[in-house]
């Protein structure tokens, strides 16, 4: 029987033993308020700050608040309660306690959990993300303390989390082990709490002072680079000073697009779009959904900017910032001849593989190569000579960009691979170390090459894709910020540095002391570093003043409104990114700017009247008021100060031009305080069309009924056509568009300058069947998907216009096809669990929503999480989408054959049964009650498979990383068998865990007194970090070794068991391995003599190894498709 689990991608996905304790208690067990009664109560708790405690930053994205809680329990072995609570302690403003089951939670292990003490009294929707560890202290030798780390998002429904099988009870109660001394047990809990950020309402600008960049589809790699360049103020200032012309459009000019982007990053309150910039690159939509190489983009962008800067005041800026020089040399050893060549660089590519840190990479960079033998150097008139070849640096640039070679071509596998090895980089980099060993003789030694780390660009994922983001400290202080597309958060130094080194981390041990720790690879790591030279810091991190920034004016006209409304936009009046843009020096008087407009647009100055746009409290943008003559006499820069009061980063204007009878411009009419400028849209229900039809001045004391004839005339209706009016009020977070009382004055209806009035013909009898009969329905339709058929339109409109909801597009993918797009639903973040599964079932045409099972998304690995969402275990949609401090927009779904609540009462095992004489495995799904035993599973299997004979015995083995770790006893309950990862094995490479079911050979049943049953594993030796490491692969097996048996005898039986051809067997080496160190055996060696030691953690660390010296992928033999000889590494595709 085989249960497969994929390799954990990071520590955060290790949920192997982390389950809510209630799942392991017979029936529902409500948490009891307060500590349980004891024979001897626990001593008063001790609370001290943990080593990792961070400072509290009172923000939504605050640093985690942390404490250490110590619980000393006397008379532990005399406790006669099933479960026991500690005293309450406070972290992050909330009350916590530790919960233990001294005799185990229906298992022979100590069970221990962290619990929210007052969960029943917390407000609706409460949640907190916590990283915590629980430990049982070894009071004799602290190094044997058993400690397990995990994390959880605590909520009212999931208020406790931890380890059902924390440590074996036999080990805990053994007085010689040191966990109980004088019958006293000491438990420690380190708890760090962080509020889960609701990024739908999170305000990056408010929380950090910075804004993010919108992701167009796959442009996160570009966003991380742009943020890094933006936060080099000297570079930003140079971009601002690049000349552009009035005729330039951002979508066609890289300098103008980059200026516009940087300007918005500096002044916007919300995240900034990059479409104008990518259009200026000449990219289409396809390019925006393709991830490109960051290093290549960096070089191409800098080359383009360098070219654009030629002949301007900022010429040479790119070279001044990023250009360094090194000298390539070849020096003969036996004759006086030396060849040198000076080369420039904008960035350096550093090796990661085989290097522990940046300094090791520089050592490798300047490593001297010997040219000798067949590789001698031809030294002109000296002929072939022994020589030394190398590279030394002449000078380093003020801004040093280091590209880490995380991606390399693997010739053995004929593919690109990502190097996830641990690679350290310092906060302060000294390139003058060891008396300037990296510098050439020509280097200027008076320049101090001491650098401070400015940015860390991170890649999370694999070679075929992933996610990019950046950690930056803009002013080189201790405060770091994470720029992750639209979201900017404060981060600490450890997060920016140590957690981006990569490498491996250990999984929490399920049986500490009995097996070696399992390690997993961290797939998030740094791939680009930016350092700034300390001596140039003040010049590089300079102030970017208003005088450095040319003003961008965007001018919207009636033509823009007609062009966009009903096509590009439906709400508000215009998309300002698509209107005419002028780039003007701040010192220019506005009256001179009007002359520029006259030249550009052909509208004489005397016919121009400009209105300033304002952002209203309901997040709409409307023309607010015309500029006064006094304001028009000011400079453009002074006017933007007025605009900024309206929260506009750019100066946005509406150009009002009145046309006479001949359609030629005429002077604008006088405007008094009584006059109101209104904009009008017409809706056609039958065509479902909305369009802009014009604007009118009305008197605030007037009434809508007085302008009906004029509106009919405006659109060509009969003068007496009956029309209905609506005021378009807002569209975020929900649409609000209300009927306008025709007989009430505009002042009474609170109509003001810039308001939008929508109107339409009154529907005739018999026309009510149209899909969207009025503007309200149409606006709702374009904003939100159609209402479910069983909801009346009236109630739908009521919900739509009165409920304040935050909508989100959620992408649903079939779990068995996690990489394929499925369907999308627009849902509200406060939709309940039942709401979500009902919508999914409705979309799939399924009558019973309880047969839908959802699985959340891992934002880091871009894969499904190991554990599906339990039936009604979350309060709302937001809880399903939160992954630590990120919000996903992906959920995976399954359609079950039985309702989920019923399924959760059963244990489902996916079994791969290997017949003793057949190669193909039979895959079975076994469902049994959770209290069933392994023996029950074996009996069930016997009814479904063909055995070699009726009385054949079966056994169940636990295999991890191709090693046998355990033979499951027949009495073990199946609920204790970990199968969390099995269902997702198709999304990962490599068989990591197998519950292997096979028939027990007859020879194992007849073991003699001196026979030994040993483990046999396949392995190869591979180089990693300049060390040879043993890599196991394939299926392990047991083998009986008889006393006095030589290796030659054993080979014969191994060959017979595996059915390996002579030619192939001759290539294998047989070795005795203990703790990963091979000791190669000769044919005459007595094998049994090696397997006498007992002082090892377990049998899996002492085995007979079959080394496959050929490092090419091992294919199955054509003549004999044997399961023991499949290619390496094993991939699970089903």
Image (cartoon, helix red, strand yellow):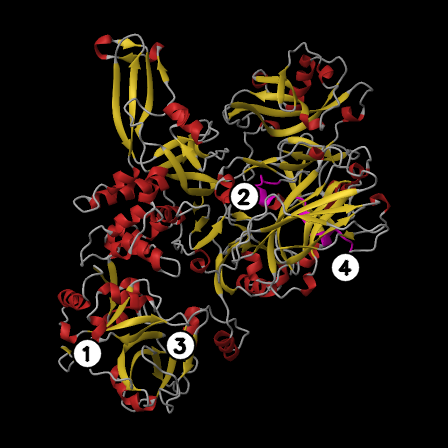
Residue 723 vertical position relative to residue 25 in the rendered view, above or below: below
Earlier in the chain: of badge 3 and badge 1, it is 1
Please state the total of marks drawn on the protein image: 4
Viewer-proximal residue among 967 and 949: 967
Mark nearer the viewer, 3 or 4: 4
Viewer-proximal residue among 400 and 1022: 400
Residue 598 vertical position relative to residue 1052 in the rendered view, above or below: below
Find residue 658 and name its label: 1
Q: Quadrant of the N terminus?
A: top right
Residue at figure coordinates x 66%, y 31% from the top left: 516
Magenta region, residue range: 5-29
Label 1 crowd bin: few (<14), some (14–19), many (20+), radius 10 Å: some
C-alpha gap between disc 1 and disc 4:
75 Å
Q: Quadrant of the C terminus?
A: top right
Label 3 crowd bin: few (<14), some (14–19), many (20+), radius 10 Å: some
Find residue 32 and name its label: 4
C-alpha gap between disc 3 and disc 4:
51 Å
C-alpha gap between disc 3 and disc 1:
26 Å
C-alpha gap between disc 4 and disc 2:
41 Å
Q: Are marks 2 and 3 in contact (CB under 8 Å)?
A: no
Find residue 987 and name its label: 2
Left or right, 594 with respect to 210, comes to: left
Residue at figure coordinates x 18%, y 62% from the top left: 588
Tell whether position 24 is magenta.
yes
Secondary structure of the residue carrying tag 1 is strand
In the picture as drawn, the residue positioned furthest to the front comes out as 446
Q: Are marks 3 and 1 in contact (CB under 8 Å)?
A: no
Majority secondary structure of the magenta segment? loop
Residue 618 vertical position relative to residue 451 in the rendered view, above or below: below
Mark nearer the viewer, 2 or 3: 3
Residue 683 vertical position relative to residue 965 in the rendered view, above or below: below
């Amino acid at each position: 029987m085989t249960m497969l689990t994929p390799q954990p991608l990071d520590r955060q996905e290790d949920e192997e033993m982390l389950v809510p304790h209630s799942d392991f208690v017979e029936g529902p067990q409500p948490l009891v308020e307060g500590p349980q009664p004891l024979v001897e109560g626990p001593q008063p708790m001790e609370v001290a700050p943990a080593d990792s405690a961070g400072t509290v930053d009172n923000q939504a994205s605050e640093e985690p608040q942390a404490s250490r809680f110590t619980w000393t329990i006397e008379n532990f072995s005399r406790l006669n309660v099933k479960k026991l609570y500690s005293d309450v302690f406070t972290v992050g403003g909330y009350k916590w306690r530790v919960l233990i089951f001294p005799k185990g939670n229906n298992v022979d292990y100590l069970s221990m959990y962290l619990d929210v003490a007052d969960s029943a009294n917390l407000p609706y929707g409460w949640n907190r993300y916590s990283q915590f560890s629980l430990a049982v202290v070894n009071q004799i030798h602290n190094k044997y303390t058993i400690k397990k780390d995990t994390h959880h998002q605590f909520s009212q429904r999931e208020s406790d989390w931890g380890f059902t099988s924390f440590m074996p009870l036999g080990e805990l109660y053994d007085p010689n082990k040191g966990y109980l001394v004088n019958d006293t047990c000491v438990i420690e809990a380190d708890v760090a709490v962080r509020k889960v950020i609701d990024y739908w309402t999170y305000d990056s600008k408010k929380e950090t002072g910075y804004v993010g960049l919108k992701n167009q589809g796959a442009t996160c790699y570009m966003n991380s680079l742009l943020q890094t360049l933006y936060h080099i103020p000297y570079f930003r200032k140079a971009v601002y000073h690049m000349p552009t012309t009035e005729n330039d459009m951002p979508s066609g000019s890289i300098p103008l697009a980059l200026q516009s982007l940087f300007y918005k990053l500096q002044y916007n309150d919300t995240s900034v779009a990059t479409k104008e910039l990518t259009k200026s690159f000449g990219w289409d939509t396809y390019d925006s959904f393709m991830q490109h190489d960051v290093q290549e983009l960096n070089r191409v962008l800098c080359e383009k900017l360098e070219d654009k800067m030629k002949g301007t005041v900022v010429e040479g800026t790119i070279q001044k910032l990023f250009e360094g020089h090194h000298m390539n040399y070849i020096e003969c050893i036996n004759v006086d001849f030396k060849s040198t060549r000076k080369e420039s660089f904008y960035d350096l590519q550093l090796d990661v593989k085989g290097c522990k840190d940046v300094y090791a990479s520089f050592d490798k960079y300047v490593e001297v190569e010997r040219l000798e033998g067949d590789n001698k150097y031809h030294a002109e008139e000296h002929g072939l000579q022994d020589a030394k070849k190398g590279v030394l640096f002449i000078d380093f640039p003020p801004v040093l960009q280091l590209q880490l070679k995380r991606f390399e071509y693997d010739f053995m596998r004929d593919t690109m691979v990502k190097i996830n090895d641990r690679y350290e980089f310092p906060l302060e980099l000294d390139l003058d170390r060891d008396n300037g060993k990296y510098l050439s003789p020509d280097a200027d030694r008076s320049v101090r090459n001491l650098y401070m780390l400015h940015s860390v660009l991170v890649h999370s994922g694999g070679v075929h894709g992933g996610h990019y983001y950046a950690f930056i400290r803009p002013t080189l202080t201790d405060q770091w910020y994470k720029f992750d597309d639209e979201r900017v958060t404060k981060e600490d130094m450890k997060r920016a540095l140590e957690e981006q080194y990569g490498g491996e981390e250990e999984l929490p041990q399920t049986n500490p002391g009995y097996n070696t720790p399992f390690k997993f690879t961290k797939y998030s790591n740094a791939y680009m570093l930016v350092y700034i030279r300390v001596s140039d810091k003040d010049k590089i991190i300079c102030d970017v003043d208003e005088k450095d920034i040319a003003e961008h004016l965007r001018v919207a006209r009636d033509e823009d409104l007609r062009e966009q409304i009903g096509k590009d936009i439906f709400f508000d009046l215009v998309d300002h990114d698509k209107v005419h843009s002028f780039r003007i020096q701040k010192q220019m008087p506005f009256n001179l700017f009007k002359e520029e407009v006259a030249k550009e647009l052909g509208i004489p100055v005397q016919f121009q009247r400009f209105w300033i746009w304002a952002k209203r409290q309901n997040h709409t943008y409307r023309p607010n008021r015309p500029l006064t003559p006094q304001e028009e006499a000011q400079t453009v820069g002074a006017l933007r100060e007025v605009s900024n009061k309206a929260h506009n980063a750019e100066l946005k204007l509406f150009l009002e031009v009145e046309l006479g009878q001949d359609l030629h411009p005429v002077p604008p009419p006088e405007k008094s305080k009584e006059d109101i400028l209104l904009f009008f849209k017409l809706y056609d229900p039958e065509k479902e069309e909305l369009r802009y039809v014009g604007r009118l001045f009305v008197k605030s004391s007037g009434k809508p009924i007085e302008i009906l004839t004029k509106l009919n005339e405006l659109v060509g209706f009969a003068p007496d056509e009956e029309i209905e009016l609506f005021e378009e009020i807002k569209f975020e977070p929900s649409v609000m568009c209300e009927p306008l009382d025709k007989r009430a004055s505009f002042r009474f209806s609170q109509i003001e300058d810039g308001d939008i009035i929508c109107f339409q013909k009154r529907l005739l009898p018999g026309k009510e069947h149209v899909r969207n009969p009025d503007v309200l329905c149409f606006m709702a339709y374009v904003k939100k998907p159609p209402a479910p058929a069983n909801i009346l339109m009236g109630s739908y409109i009521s919900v739509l216009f009165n409920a304040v909801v935050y909508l989100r597009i959620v992408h649903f993918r079939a779990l068995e096809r996690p990489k394929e797009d499925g369907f999308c639903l627009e849902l509200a973040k406060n939709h309940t669990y039942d709401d979500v599964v009902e919508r999914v079932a409705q979309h799939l045409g399924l009558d019973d929503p309880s047969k839908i099972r959802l699985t959340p998304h891992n934002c880091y690995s871009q894969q499904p999480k190991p554990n599906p969402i339990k039936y009604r275990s979350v309060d709302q949609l937001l809880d399903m989408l939160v992954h630590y401090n990120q919000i996903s927009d992906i959920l995976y779904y399954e359609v079950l054959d039985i309702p989920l609540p019923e399924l959760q009462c059963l244990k489902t095992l996916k079994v791969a049964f290997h017949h003793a004489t057949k190669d193909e495995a039979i895959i079975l799904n076994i469902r049994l009650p959770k209290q069933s035993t392994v023996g029950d599973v074996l009996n069930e299997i016997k009814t479904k498979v063909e055995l070699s004979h009726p009385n054949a015995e079966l056994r169940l083995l636990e295999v991890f990383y191709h090693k046998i770790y355990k033979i499951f006893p027949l009495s073990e309950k199946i609920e204790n068998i970990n199968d969390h990862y099995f269902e997702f094995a198709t999304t990962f490479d490599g068989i990591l865990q197998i519950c292997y079911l096979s028939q027990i050979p007859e020879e194992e049943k007849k073991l003699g007194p001196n026979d030994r049953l040993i483990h046999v594993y396949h392995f190869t030796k591979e180089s990693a970090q300049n060390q040879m490491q043993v890599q196991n692969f394939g299926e392990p097996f047991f083998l009986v070794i008889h006393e006095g048996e030589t290796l030659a005898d054993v080979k014969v039986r191994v060959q017979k068991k595996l059915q390996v051809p002579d030619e192939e067997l001759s290539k294998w080496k047989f070795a005795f391995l203990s703790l990963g160190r091979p000791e190669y055996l000769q044919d005459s060696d007595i094998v049994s003599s090696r397997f006498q030691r007992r002082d090892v953690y377990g049998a899996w660390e002492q085995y007979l190894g079959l080394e496959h010296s050929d490092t090419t992928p091992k294919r199955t033999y054509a003549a004999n498709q044997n399961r023991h000889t499949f290619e390496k590494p094993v991939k699970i595709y089903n």
